[in-house]
Amino acid sequence: MEWMAFRGQFLPLMIIRRYLKLTFNYCHDNGLLDKQIDELKGMELPFRIDLLPTTFPKPNELTLNIDEKKNAL
């Protein structure tokens, strides 16, 4: 997610999907789903909760896989 913030480019959906799935599973397993994001910011987590995307580009601006970007170039 830091790469995405640094580059100002949205990652392909398959990467975002996998990252969010791992984040959700971690939060579920550790009883964090009912906590507010502000509470989680102060915790030591294996991910940066403040970098999770909350807004997404328009569907026509998204790519599904990295290979799609290569083919578009």
Image (spheres, grey):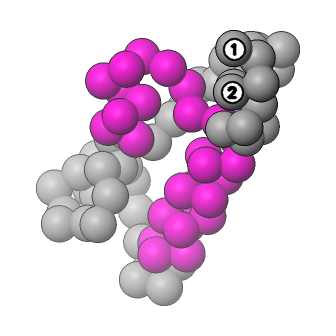
Amino acid under label 2? Lys
Point out the image quarter for the C terminus: top right
Query: Left of 32 or right of it: where is 11?
Result: right
Q: Residue at x 83, y 14 (%)?
A: 60
Residue bounds of the magenta highlight: 1-27
Distance from disc 1 to disc 2, alpha carbons, whole Å, reads 5 Å
Front residue of 18 and 28: 18
Label 2, residues with CA under 10 Å away: few <14, some 14-19, many ≥20: few
Residue 47 sits in quarter: bottom left
Q: Locate residue 39, reporting x and y percent.
A: 27, 56
Q: State yes or no: discs 1 and 2 in contact (Cβ < 8 Å).
A: yes
Label 1, residues with CA under 10 Å away: few <14, some 14-19, many ≥20: few
- Residue bearing the label numbered 1: 73
Number of numbered callouts drawn:
2
Q: Locate residue 13, reporting x and y percent.
A: 70, 40
* Magenta residues, dominant SS class: helix
Front residue of 62 and 36: 62
Front residue of 18 and 65: 65
Q: Is residue 33 visible?
A: no
Point out the image quarter for the N terminus: top left
Query: Left of 20 or right of it: where is 3?
Result: left
Q: Residue at x 82, y 20 (%)?
A: 59
Q: Is residue 41 magenta?
A: no
Q: Residue at x 57, y 33 (%)?
A: 11
| Residue positioned most to the right | 60
Front residue of 40 and 1: 1
Q: Is residue 68 visible?
A: yes
- Residue bearing the label numbered 2: 70
Residue 24 sits in quarter: bottom right
Q: Locate residue 25, reporting x and y percent.
A: 55, 75
